[in-house]
Image (cartoon, helix red, strand yellow):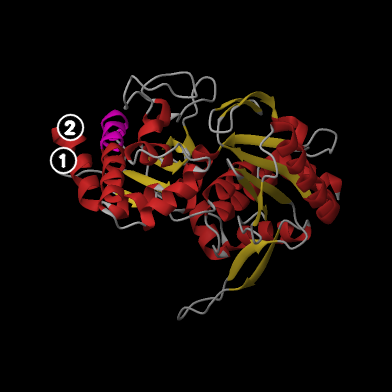
Amino acid sequence: MTPARRGQWQTASAVLTRLARQPGITRSEVARALRLSTGSATEVTARLRDVHLLTEAPAPTQGRGRPTTVLQAHPQGPVVLALDLRQSSWRSAVVALDGSLSEPQYKRHRSRRAQVVLNNLRGEVEQAQQQYGARLQMVSLAVPGTVRDNHLMQAPTLEWVELDLTQVTAGLDVPLLAGNDATLSGVAESRTGAAAGAGTAVHLIIEVGIGGTLLIDGVPAQGAAGAGGEYGHMPFGDRSRACPCGARGCWDLEIDGRALARHLKEPTPDDPVAYTERVLRRSDRAARRAVTSVVTALGYGIAGLVNAHDPDVVTIGGLAIPLRAAAEEAFAEAYEGGLMTFHRSAPPPVLAATHQPDGPLRGAAALALDQLTSEPAIASWVAQR
């Protein structure tokens, strides 16, 4: 590739990256953001249109001035299959270069055995490949566990350990990108959600246990082994309680359906998410006390993370949103009470996630699009045509 050609793809990459992070952006807005002349913006969008990477539609008229266009993913361009694996189900969506999702499909596990679930996910990939052919450029998988180099190291809520996730795409000639679901949900919020524009953000999500991530300018801090953000396994709980992860006193055990059942002296639920939803619908005093206890543990834990990370904003997703809403005073008291004094005059806001319930899908797509909008990926796409 000549230096001139590399320069052209460099600008094209910047345009596509901007489109993925700012859906609905106009050509004139891209030109201003990237400091391109009108002619350069027109030239690069024309080239991207010719190779089926983007298309343009008339932008809504906004007063005087030269008309512009809205940039969109090309209908024949590359796509990502995003998969969101959960304890009792999984969801899938096809994602275009502008981050737009198809209607997510939902399926419950017939079995929670790892091989059965992974085979089902592989079937979804095969179906997408049949439908989209070479347009399917990547599969991005969100899983509720610790992931390193596309290997699931540990997923306590699924009771899975040391699984090679690449079997989901092995032999299908499409690369896999796998990551932790809470981390990916945080990426979505930091890129295009409630934390967009924040330099430093903490994201937390409660499903079965609690997970999250620290994000700096939209990039998750994943740690040396890819295990960053396992906040649920910080010792914020009762050290007499053993966690399935192998540690004791985990925060996980204080803030989900398992904790509610313990407070209510009921059996540990097989589906802690559904159990939490049922308890939240109850109005009896015992249920209210149980919810208050869980929300108090949530507030104090978030305060601890604020003291540690000093974020601009904290976003919460999953069951954290209805739990806080059910005991707002208890949450506020615990959150403020756990903050260092200097944080209390202007505590970071704790905001509900924007991308409920699609955060893991959107975050998985976002990291895949980071790769597909790179210069080498654009050159590879063009070479295939």
Percent from the top left, x then y, of residue 197? 40, 49
Percent from the top left, x then y, of residue 141? 65, 40
Viewer-proximal residue, 294 or 169? Answer: 294
Magenta highlight range: 300-309
Q: CA distance from mark 1 to mark 2?
A: 7 Å
Q: Quadrant of residue 226?
A: top right
Percent from the top left, x then y, of residue 97? 66, 54
Q: Are marks 1 and 2 in contact (CB under 8 Å)?
A: yes
Viewer-proximal residue, 41 or 92? Answer: 92
Q: Which secondary structure type mostly characterizes the magenta part of the structure?
A: helix
**The N terminus lies in which quarter of the figure?**
top right
Q: Residue furthest front?
A: 266
Whether 348 is among the magenta residues is no
Q: Within 10 Å of the Cα at label 1, are there few (<14), some (14-19), or many (20+) other Cα atoms?
A: few
- Figure check: 206 above or below 165: below
**SS state under label 1:** helix
Q: Residue 194, can we see it?
A: no
Percent from the top left, x then y, of residue 42? 65, 63
Viewer-proximal residue, 352 or 194? Answer: 352
Horizontal relation, residue 218 to residue 144: left or right: left
Q: Amino acid at mark 2?
A: Met
Residue occupied by mark 2: 340
- Figure check: 305 above or below 106: above
Viewer-proximal residue, 68 or 283? Answer: 283
**SS state under label 2:** loop
Residue 344: mark:
1
* Residue shown at 31% from the left, 55% from the top: 325
* Residue shown at 45% from the left, 53% from the top: 193
Q: Amino acid at mark 1?
A: Arg
Q: Residue 304, can we see it?
A: yes
Residue 16: mark:
none
